[in-house]
Image: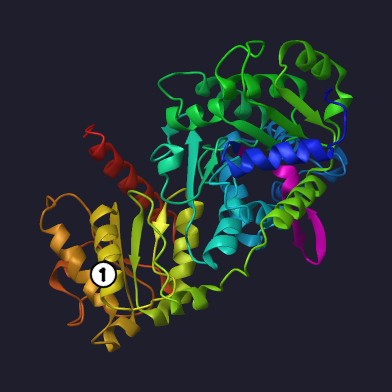
Amino acid sequence: MTGMQPPLDDFWDDLLECIEERRVVPIIGPDLLTVTVEGRETLLYPHLATRLAERLRIPASGLPAEPSLHEVVCQYLQARGRREEVYPKIRSLMKEVTVAPPAPLVKLARIKEFDLFVTLTFDALMVDALNQARFGGATGAEHLAFAPNKVQDLPAERERLPRPVVYALLGRLSASPDYVITEEDTLEFLYALQSEAKRPQLLFDELQHNHLLIVGCAFPDWLARFFIRIAKSRQLSMQRGETEILVAPHVADDRNLVVFLEHFSYGTRLLPCNAVEFVAELARRWEARHPQAPQPKAADAAAAGEPLADMAPGAIFLSYAKEDFEAVERLKTSLELAGLDVWFDKHRLEAGDQYDQKIRRNIKNCSLFVPVISGNTERRLEGYFRREWKLAEERALGIAEHVPFIVPVVVDDTDAYTEGVPERLQKAQWTRLPNGVITPEFEARMVRLVRECRKRERGHA
């Protein structure tokens, strides 16, 4: 069976069998990110590149019709711009572009045997797709990322993961250069991944011992070879039982890559297919074998008594009154764009004892507790958020006074020191963020506090 053949029924049967056995890890790239912007369907990253060129005042005459982020940055550097200035601008652009999870990602998310996704993009759209497809819109998937200066690994072996994980192997969006936008960034990330000290070992154990479905990643020849070699952690010509399936429309046009893989990487199969169409066909065949009941909406899931989504270890806990939901969701989104894990009860279920244990556990395990103060919390003399505040106060009693744990935020013009706020919260350093809009200073502080917390957990402080 050569790498040039289109997928036949035998291929699909074999692939579906392996997915059913949870032996396939999908690796997704930017060619799957079809989004609708201003009524027009486009790929997200070329759209971001065009917007970035406008923001940086780079003349369109010096760029291709659909430039890449790499090409835009190169033009900016040629005009004596500074590389470090680009990353926060991309983060700002992502805030302005509100897009729904692309249909290909939602189709993949509905295949529940996929419990570990590796993405080569810096956005959170695969996480959003999982939350939509499996959790009725509530927060349920875990988003982890690699960066040479900040290594995250899986929280456990794959069979013990408490919830689906999306791992951003080339970094996650932030205001710092902690994610890939240029070819130099790619080189540095792959170089760092070769280091035993920096490599996320649990993740790479899964990549080495499972089949890899690489979809929507338009690798150049050198990167395709290098990426597969790093993922499999051994010489490609060595006998192995796992397969890599590389799906991209022009992958077979690169004769050098084809010849190399045919002679030295017998386990790699090339499929010159449109990535979006491939995912659609995979989803169609999967659903034919596994008819699914309609996914519940978030409110329906809450009414049915489904458990709250698990919290990522060391996440920031947001506690709020339900009337402040919009401001709190804006606050949460901004902190996540800064690369932080954030948890809150999206629906303010206030369902009593059945939720108490998880709330207690999450407050016990969070890195920072953020009570959101407002006129609404002042007016409500009873509410589940007051129980959360009490639990946070109890945990704070066991934390040294100079170590920040409770970080109150005021989202309107409410007085910081009122009778409705417990004494321990009044003693903490308050921040006023009207309507939940964060400031650069607050973002930097939260990033620093979370990093300090993680250092203490590792025994480095």
Residue tagged by mark 1?
Answer: 356
Magenta segment's dominant SS is strand
Q: How many marks?
A: 1
Q: Residue at x 29, y 89 (%)?
A: 379
Q: Is residue 221 covered in magenta?
A: no
Q: Secondary structure at mark 1?
A: helix
Percent from the top left, x then y, of residue 17?
66, 40
Q: Is residue 26 covered in magenta?
A: yes
Can residue 427 be seen by looking at this rendering? no
Residue 300 position (above or below residue 398): below
Q: Residue at x 55, y 20 (%)?
A: 191
Image quadrant where one finds the N terminus? top right
Image quadrant where one finds the C terminus? top left
Q: Image check: 62 left or right of 195?
A: right
Q: Quadrant of residue 459?
A: top left
Pick whichever, 367 or 71, lies toward us. Answer: 367
* Magenta-tinted stretch: 25-42
Q: Residue at x 82, y 19 (%)?
A: 258
Inspect the image, locate mark 1, and give the three-letter code of the amino acid beneath it.
Answer: Asp
Q: Image check: 169 left or right of 274?
A: left
Percent from the top left, x then y, of residue 392?
20, 64
Residue 232 position (above or below residue 358): above
Residue 312 position (above or below residue 1): below
Q: Image check: 29 left or right of 393?
A: right
Colour scheme of this structure image? rainbow
Percent from the top left, x then y, of residue 252?
86, 27
Percent from the top left, x then y, of residue 250?
86, 32
Is disc 1 surrounded by few (<14), some (14 to 19) or many (20+) residues within 10 Å? Answer: some
Can residue 460 be seen by looking at this rendering? yes
Q: Quadrant of residue 419?
A: bottom left
